[in-house]
Image (cartoon, helix red, strand yellow):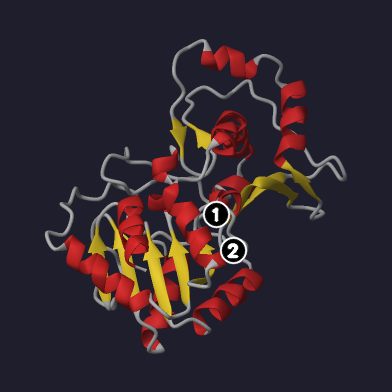
């Protein structure tokens, strides 16, 4: 289940490790000649313009839960109005150097796969091929009643038809703040008309695991298989606050697979990690690549 252990408040500002260069060399030594599986979080995507929940400069937010979404039509209307604007920002985002580097490492045989907690598809866009999208992606929508699936682009056309001029009216009021999970920050959504499933008229939901919702067992099994077959687990850009991601670091540590963490600030796995690096994801991976 995707559960947040603490309130979504910004993490504390930290300074990069004073011995970061030495730690990068240690990381290169740890990865060299070994099969590495990578677990990524929001911190790897912030350089691509996608905000996170826990970054030091992030505003405090309360994400919608699964129970709210399925239990209250008002919450669903509010979500779809925000998503109607925010998903296009995520669709337009492009991989940064960290995503590209991990894809290159996979082609070189250094990385065996990526488990990502992000829903932004940036690993796929960068060229990674073995990717477990633990929390789903923004690009697919499913019906909670009949299970029918459709692309987010197809739903966009229907929402445009149901809400002509909505995006333009909101944009005319000023800049739109984009929030994580492919939505936007909007206050007034009372006049928005959500779409229903074209097959059965049921409730539509993005293929994203909400807080309070179980991660599909097949994804967990695929992620576990990657971890179990690896020599090293490398965590990049995640505080591991969410249990659904932390369990893989815990699984590796308890089975004797060394865990390395690259993140700004302390993470939940710091006490179990063989190596930690407090630094920028892009800069650390680039420096490590030069040594490999």
Farthest residue toward the right?
199
Q: Residue 287 or 79: which is nearer the viewer?
A: 287
Q: Is residue 219 visible to us here?
A: yes
Q: Residue 208 or 76: which is nearer the viewer?
A: 208
Q: Residue 152 or 60: which is nearer the viewer?
A: 152
Q: Is residue 51 visible to us here?
A: no
Farthest residue toward the bottom?
255
In the displayed structure, does residue 144 sit left or right of residue 53? Answer: right
Q: How many marks?
A: 2
Q: Residue 46 or 20: which is nearer the viewer?
A: 20
Q: Are marks 2 and 1 in contact (CB under 8 Å)?
A: yes
Residue assigned mark 2 = 131
Pinpoint residue 117: horizontal percent, then vertical percent. Answer: 49, 58
* Element under disc 2: strand
In the displayed structure, does residue 197 sit left or right of residue 117? Answer: right
Pinpoint residue 164: horizontal percent, then vertical percent. Answer: 71, 16
Q: Quadrant of residue 259?
A: bottom left
Residue at horizontal 66%, vertical 72%?
Answer: 218
The earlier-in-sequence mark between 2 and 1 is 1
Pinpoint residue 54: horizontal percent, then vertical percent. Answer: 33, 49
* Element under disc 1: helix
In the displayed structure, does residue 265 sit left or right of residue 245? Answer: left
Mark 1 residue crowding within 10 angstroms, few (<14) / some (14–19) / many (20+): many
Q: Quadrant of residue 215?
A: bottom right
Q: Quadrant of residue 233?
A: bottom left
Residue assigned mark 1 = 123
Pinpoint residue 263: horizontal percent, then vertical percent. Answer: 30, 58
Q: Is residue 67 above or below residue 171?
A: below
Residue at horizontal 18%, vertical 54%?
Answer: 16
Mark 2 residue crowding within 10 angstroms, few (<14) / some (14–19) / many (20+): some
Q: Is residue 275 above or below residue 77?
A: below
């Amino acid at each position: 289940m995707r559960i947040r252990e603490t309130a979504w408040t910004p993490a504390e500002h930290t300074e990069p490790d004073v011995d970061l260069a030495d730690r990068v060399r240690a990381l290169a030594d740890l990865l060299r000649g070994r099969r590495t599986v990578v677990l990524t979080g929001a911190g790897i995507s912030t350089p691509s313009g996608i905000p996170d929940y826990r970054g030091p400069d992030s505003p405090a937010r309360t994400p919608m839960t699964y129970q709210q979404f399925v239990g209250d039509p008002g919450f669903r209307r509010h979500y779809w109005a925000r998503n109607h604007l925010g998903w296009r920002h995520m669709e337009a985002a492009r991989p940064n150097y960290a995503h590209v580097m991990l894809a290159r490492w996979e082609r070189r045989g250094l990385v065996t796969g990526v488990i990502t907690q992000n829903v932004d598809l940036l690993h796929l866009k960068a060229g990674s091929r073995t990717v477990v999208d633990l929390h789903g992606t923004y690009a697919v929508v499913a019906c909670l009643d009949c299970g029918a699936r459709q692309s987010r682009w197809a739903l966009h056309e229907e929402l445009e038809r149901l809400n002509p001029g909505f995006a333009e009216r909101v944009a005319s009021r000023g800049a739109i703040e984009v929030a994580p999970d492919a939505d936007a920050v909007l206050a007034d959504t009372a006049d928005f008309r959500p779409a229903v499933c074209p097959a059965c008229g049921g409730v539509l939901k993005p293929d994203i695991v909400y807080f309070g919702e179980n991660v599909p067992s097949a994804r967990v099994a695929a992620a576990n298989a990657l971890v179990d077959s690896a020599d090293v687990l490398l965590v990049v850009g995640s505080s591991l606050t969410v249990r659904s991601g932390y369990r893989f670091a815990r699984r590796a540590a308890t089975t004797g697979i060394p865990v390395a963490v690259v993140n700004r600030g302390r993470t939940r796995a710091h006490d179990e990690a063989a190596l930690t690096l407090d630094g920028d994801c892009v800069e650390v991976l680039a420096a490590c690549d030069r040594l490999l």
